[in-house]
């Protein structure tokens, strides 16, 4: 498929993020990722009924969660020029590292953070173009296999609520 039905300025898939405080989410995205707020629509009760913020070539849509709705954390991948620097900015803006940065068999360097609203951001930089054959070979190498295992296990611990708070001593 070579064309898109999305309007100019939007991508084919548009992520929605539902939080308890969309105004603070917009501030976080601006600080961590250099997001540019496109607009917000406040409701009569002061909550945000619709907001849009641009990160790179993607518009992220957001609004405040209503009473009685379940928590809906998003899992988002964001491509950046420098994953390590972006992770540091995200942490400075209130995020917590869930997966330490590493370089994968796919030629990507990155890690994950959980923002103050429960969303998980996989922050990635493409550091090398790797063809599929090399990727598959690399996945059998101990360092790359360990990186993949760590990415899977840390996500599992985070989503299952078994993450270890770095401020608490290990048992």
Image (cartoon, rainbow, N blue to C red):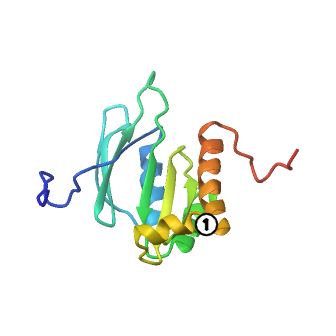
Outermost residue toward the top in this view: 68
- Image position, residue 68 (x, y; %): 45, 21
Outermost residue toward the bottom in this view: 128
- Foreground residue, 161 or 128? 128
Quarter holding the N terminus is bottom left
Q: Can the viewer see residue 56?
A: yes
Q: Can the viewer see residue 97?
A: no
The residue lying at 60 percent from left, 55 percent from top is 151
115 versus 49 height, above or below: below
Quarter holding the C terminus is top right
Q: Quadrant of residue 22?
A: top left
The residue lying at 50 percent from left, 46 percent from top is 119
- Foreground residue, 26 or 11? 11
The residue lying at 31 percent from left, 47 percent from top is 51
Looking at the rendered structure, the secondary structure element under dot 1 is helix
Q: Badge 1: how crowded within 10 Å, few (<14), some, or many (20+)?
A: some
- Foreground residue, 147 or 25? 147
- Foreground residue, 1 or 48? 1
- Image position, residue 165 (x, y; %): 74, 48
- Image position, residue 32 (x, y; %): 49, 64
| Label tally | 1
Q: Is residue 138 left or right of residue 23?
A: right
Pointer 1: what residue? 144
Q: Is residue 97 left or right of residue 81?
A: right
81 versus 93 height, above or below: below
The residue lying at 59 percent from left, 40 percent from top is 159
């Amino acid at each position: 498929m070579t064309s898109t039905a999305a309007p100019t300025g939007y991508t084919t898939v548009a992520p929605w993020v539902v939080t308890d405080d969309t105004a603070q989410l917009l501030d976080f995205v601006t600080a961590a990722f250099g997001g540019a707020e496109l607009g917000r629509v406040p409701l009569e009760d002061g909550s945000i009924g619709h907001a849009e913020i641009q990160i790179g070539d993607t518009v992220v849509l957001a609004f405040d969660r209503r009473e009685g709705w379940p928590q809906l954390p998003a899992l988002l991948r964001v491509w950046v020029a420098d994953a390590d620097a972006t992770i540091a900015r995200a942490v400075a803006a209130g995020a917590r590292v869930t997966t330490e940065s590493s370089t994968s068999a796919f030629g990507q360097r990155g890690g994950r953070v959980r923002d103050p609203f429960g969303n998980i951001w996989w922050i990635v930089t493409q550091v090398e173009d790797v063809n599929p054959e090399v990727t598959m070979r690399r996945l059998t190498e101990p360092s790359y296999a360990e990186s993949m295992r760590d990415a899977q296990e840390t996500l599992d611990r985070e989503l299952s609520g078994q993450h270890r708070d770095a401020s608490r001593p290990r048992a």
